[in-house]
Amino acid sequence: MIYLVEHFFSIQGEGRYSGVPSIFLRFGGCNLRCPGFGETIKDGEVIPGCDTVRAVYGSHFKQTWRTIESADEIEAIIASYIKDLGYRPDIVLTGGEPMIYANDPIFNEALGRIVEAGFRVTIETNATIAPDFVRHPFYSDVIFAMAVKLSNSGEPYEKRVIPEAIHALATRGRDPFFKFTLDRAIVEDGAHEQIEGITEGLENEVYCMPLGDSIDKLQMHAPAVVDFCLRHGYHYSDRLHVRLWNREEKR
Ligand code: SF4
């Protein structure tokens, strides 16, 4: 059973393909909670977590998720966006954590068809789960944006850093890259050591992005993250969708 939270057509706001027209498929469910990233208030209840809690907490949001029962449904969604376009946008699978479906036959059939059709596909993942690259070779044509969580996520190290999964994704996908979320406190307190530890022995590009689901929060952390990138030679990634549309969803 796979759940789709939403789909939309926009520009990629983060990472290497920032600015590229992309069809986003946001899947429901995540194996982490990241309580350090903030909180959302729903019906008077404070829910700790990231800016996509609506894609994380099935307990609170599942009634808004759509159950996908066939790969045809995913193909039809993509077809509905591209029918009037004269080009192929990127396809971005995000969440939540899309790789919780790495063993789901419908998910894999849909992804295999999208890759086979020649789309450039990025999976935005927390890099704790690797797919079976032998059984499903199309994963080797997928770009993994590996958003491994640092200590500011509030998750324990053993849950957020799974070296075998990171290594598999970093070496077996197509041109994968790291994307870390930093705030101005962690920049001064261990971010570089943590990133070095996670990426040790790997050659993938590293992008660092400021924490923030609103323009105000983004701007609070962004200058420190830019300085950090300049100091250590990492790529800075902004959050274009937040700059342009602030807290609007489906952007
Ligand atoms: S891993 Fe990503 S989607 Fe899951 S709770 Fe953490 S920030 Fe949110």
Image (cartoon, grey):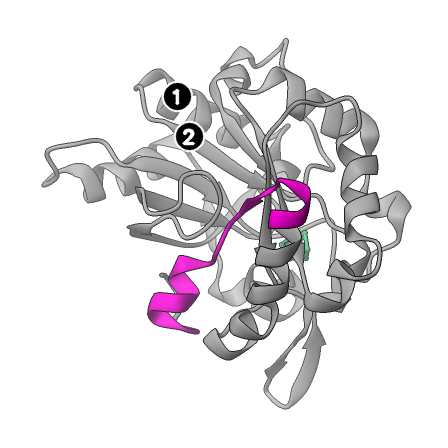
Q: Considering only order in the chain, which callout, 1 or 2, is on the residue closer to the N terminus?
A: 1
Residue 54's place in the image compared with 145, above or below, is below
Residue 206's place in the image compared with 189, above or below, is above
Three-letter code, disc 2: Val
Q: Position of residue 181 (x, y in %)?
A: 64, 55
Q: Is residue 48 visible in the rendered structure shown here? A: yes
Which range of residues does the magenta coloring cover? 230-247
Q: Which residue is mark 2?
A: 121
Quadrant containing the N terminus in the rendered view: top right
Q: Residue at x 34, y 67 (%)?
A: 244
Q: Position of residue 205 (x, y in %)?
A: 59, 31
* Quarter of the image where one finds residue 116: top left
Alpha carbon of mark 2 to alpha carbon of mark 1: how far?
Answer: 7 Å
Marks 2 & 1, CB-CB < 8 Å contact = yes
Q: Position of residue 213 (x, y in %)?
A: 53, 70
* Local SS, label 2: strand
Q: Is residue 51 visible in the rendered structure shown here? A: no
Q: Is residue 194 left or right of residue 30?
A: right
Three-letter code, disc 1: Val
Q: Nearer the viewer, residue 180 or 121?
A: 180
Mark 2 CB in 8 Å range of ligand 1?
Answer: no
